[in-house]
Amino acid sequence: MKSTKFRKELIKIMPGYKWTVHRERCKDSKYLAATGIQTAGFNRMSTLEVIVRWRDRLEYEVKSSGFGLNTPWLSDYTDVTLARALRGLQEHYGIMADNYSRHASDLEGGRKP
């Protein structure tokens, strides 16, 4: 896959991020990587990294981190299309949010006599 085609695919699916497609270090390389950021003023609100690689088939790995430049990656997800990989990561975060919300309400309920 060419980097220009990869960039167009990223912008089409996630236009709210500013994308940087990283140069290939080697011509025989079978992957491309890109980083997308969302900012509010000078603050980095969200970082998304997408790696597309060719193994037995084309696959996309997406991972994201939250507020700040040096925050750790929260989670990652791999699938055969970019849209499916992003949707899988989004669904994972939704499941985790429900889980944490349930635990928070259990703790809150435990404080009441």
Image (spheres, rainbow, N blue to C red):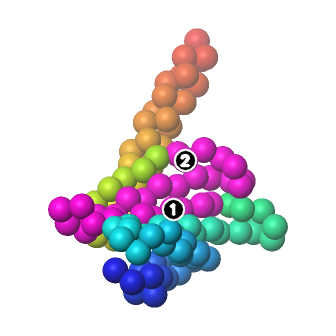
Residue 50 drawn in magenta: yes
Q: Secondary structure at mark 1?
A: strand
Cα distance between the residues tagged 1 and 2: 9 Å
Question: In the image as oriented, which residue stretches furthest toward the right?
Answer: 42
Q: Secondary structure at mark 2?
A: loop
Classify residue 43 as left or right of residue 36: right
Residue sitting at x 28%, y 60%: 79
Please state the horizontal and vertical placement of residue 93, each as a whole percent of the image.
44, 49
Query: Observer-nearest residue: 86 or 24?
Result: 24
Question: In the image as oriented, which residue stretches furthest toward the top?
Answer: 113
The kind of residue tagged 1 is Glu
Residue sitting at x 71%, y 55%: 69
Residue sitting at x 54%, y 72%: 22
- Quadrant of the rendered image containing residue 16: bottom right
Do the numbered discs 1 and 2 sit on residues whose CB atoms are within 8 Å? yes
Please state the horizontal and vertical placement of residue 36, each as a whole percent of the image.
57, 69
Classify residue 111 as left or right of residue 90: right
The kind of residue tagged 2 is Trp
Q: Which mark is residue 73?
A: 2
| The residue stretch that appears in magenta | 46-74
Please state the horizontal and vertical placement of residue 43, each as a whole percent of the image.
77, 62
Residue sitting at x 60%, y 61%: 47
- Read off the residue under disc 1: 49
